[in-house]
Image: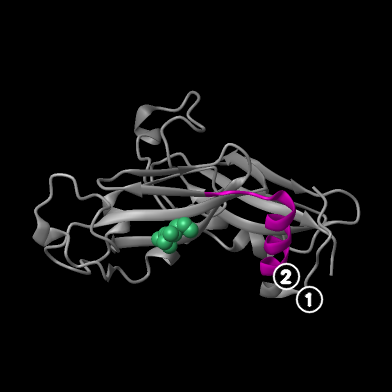
Amino acid sequence: MNLLCSGRGGEKQTVLAATCLLRTADVSTERIITCNFVQRLSCEIGVIRVQSALYGRADRQTCSEGRPPQQLTNTKCSQQGTVDNLRTRCDGKRVCELNADVVRTSDPCPGTFKYLETNYTCFPANHLVVCEHSLAQLHCDEGQVIQVYGADYGRHDQTTCSYRRPVSEVQNADCSSPTSKVAESCNGKNSCTVQASNSVFGDPCVGTFKYLQVAYVCQYPG
Ligand SMILES: *[C@@H]1O[C@H](CO)[C@@H](O)[C@H](O)[C@H]1NC(C)=O
């Protein structure tokens, strides 16, 4: 993937690069509203990038079916921190499933019937999945450098990296640990190798066989 934009380094570069990519790729925004959990975000091409999210209520119509009016009157209900929470969990992934327990960190408006509304785009990035103990190899074309967009060491479903694994090691599909370690060791390099192991990332769920997911883009150094 060629990127014609570049930033001045650090955080800024990520933001700039992202902006350029989005413009050139002309990606559309997906909008998902779920009245009852689970919410599933997915991208056929690229990776998830959460743009905005609301857990609460912003109008009377959404998710109003079968609900008494008093549960719909508060239309200024929004849980703080929802978008950051979703970004941490979903950005950089191909698929992201959100259940009530992880979204509902508080009750912003008791008595009001709340819903989860998420806007996201599919961001054109390279996506790697590497099973525990194996090596993730990130690589860019000559002259370009890696910019990691998201990385997570854990388990999010029962099928990925499940070959010849006992059920007990793959049944926990709610093991997430977003990590900045891949970015720390790979950003700015042309290629980079990281082992998907507890010795690198710690063990977020003992007894579960995990995998490392990484999303990254290649860009010309600024
Ligand atoms: C999602 O996008 C739509 C269309 O732009 C907008 O009306 C809505 O408010 C957005 N939702 C959130 C949670 O920001």
Marks 1/2: CA–CA distance: 6 Å
Colour scheme shown? one colour
Q: Is 108 rendered above or below residue 119?
A: below
Majority secondary structure in the magenta region: helix
Whether residue 186 appears in this view of the structure is yes
At x 80% / y 60%, what residue is drawn?
189
- Residue 11 is situated, as x and y percent measured from the top left of the image, at 66, 73
Q: Is 75 rendered above or below residue 132?
A: below
Residue wearing tag 2:
13
At x 38% / y 42%, what residue is drawn?
207
Q: Which mark is residue 8?
A: 1
38 and 151: which is toward the camera = 38
Left or right relative to 219: residue 127: left
At x 40% / y 34%, what residue is drawn?
170
Left or right relative to 213: residue 157: left
- Which region is colored magenta? 14-29
160 and 22: which is toward the camera = 22
Q: Is residue 162 magenta?
A: no
Dividing the picture into quarters, in which one does residue 37 lie? top left
- Residue 131 is situated, as x and y percent measured from the top left of the image, at 56, 38
- Which numbered disc, 1 or 2, marks the residue that appears first in the sequence? 1
Left or right relative to 207: residue 211: right
Dividing the picture into quarters, in which one does residue 221 lie? bottom right
